[in-house]
Image: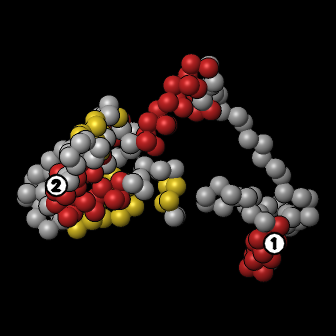
Amino acid sequence: MVNLDIQTKQQIRGAGYGIQFVGLDSHQMKLYLHKDQLSDKHLGDVFMKVNIANPKTGPNNPELQYLARKGNIGLFAWEPGGACLVKKFEKVEYVADLIGGGTRVVRQTPDMGCQWCRARAEDDTNRQSAGVVDSSETEPVMEEVSTPPAALHCDQCEYIPKAKNKRGKPFSAKQSFAQMKAHIGSAH
């Protein structure tokens, strides 16, 4: 029989929380998303904030257990990428197979970083070793600007409706006609 307190501490260490949180700034601890997407959030977004009872001493045991459970779905108190790949994730199992009901400890080699950050790092190294060029390193492609149809210009003052909105997305034909109608109604 294994002490439950030891088992929960090992579960917490397995989720990457082998560090001590002491002297936090506030009661709210941010949890960052390490998966590519969960719900409406994406990689690196603050998914939620966890309330810590006493920020000067850090999370207590139940709060760390909660953080460990959140770690199973890809939420951690540090940002993904380099900050995660320096964390040690220890896997310890207690196997009750000894004669007389004894338990032995099986320690696996610790992993550096969560499973999602490790997978992304392996993909990056595989791409680099295969010689695949990242799209951010290539030269920018010149975007062709489409001219509006000849019907969408003012014959009296050569007004042409805008092709794109503030975000850079093209206006639909209906929106372009609405711009033209507003121009004709106000200027002429």
Q: Nearer the viewer, residue 183 or 79?
A: 79
> Does the image show residue 68?
yes
Please say if 95 is above or below 50.
above
Q: Quadrant of residue 184?
A: bottom right
Spot occupied by residue 105 in the image (x, y as percentages of width and height): 24, 39
Q: Residues within 10 Å of mark 2 (few under 14, many from 20)?
A: few
Instruction: Write the residue at 85% across / 63% down.
Output: 153
Q: Amino acid at mark 1?
A: Lys
> Does the image show residue 16?
no
Are dots 2 and 1 in contact, CB under 8 Å? no
Per the rendering, the mark at residue 174 is 1
Spot occupied by residue 138 in the image (x, y as percentages of width and height): 63, 27
Left of 49 or right of it: where is 56?
A: left
The residue where tag 2 is placed is 3
Instruction: Write the residue at 20% across / 46% down.
Output: 100
Q: Quadrant of residue 140?
A: top right
Left of 51 or right of it: where is 74?
A: right
Instruction: Write the residue at 92% across / 64% down.
Output: 151
Instruction: Label 1: state its secondary structure.
Output: helix
Q: Nearer the viewer, mark 2 or mark 1?
A: 2
Q: Amino acid at mark 2?
A: Asn
Residue farthest toward the front in the current orientation of the protein = 100
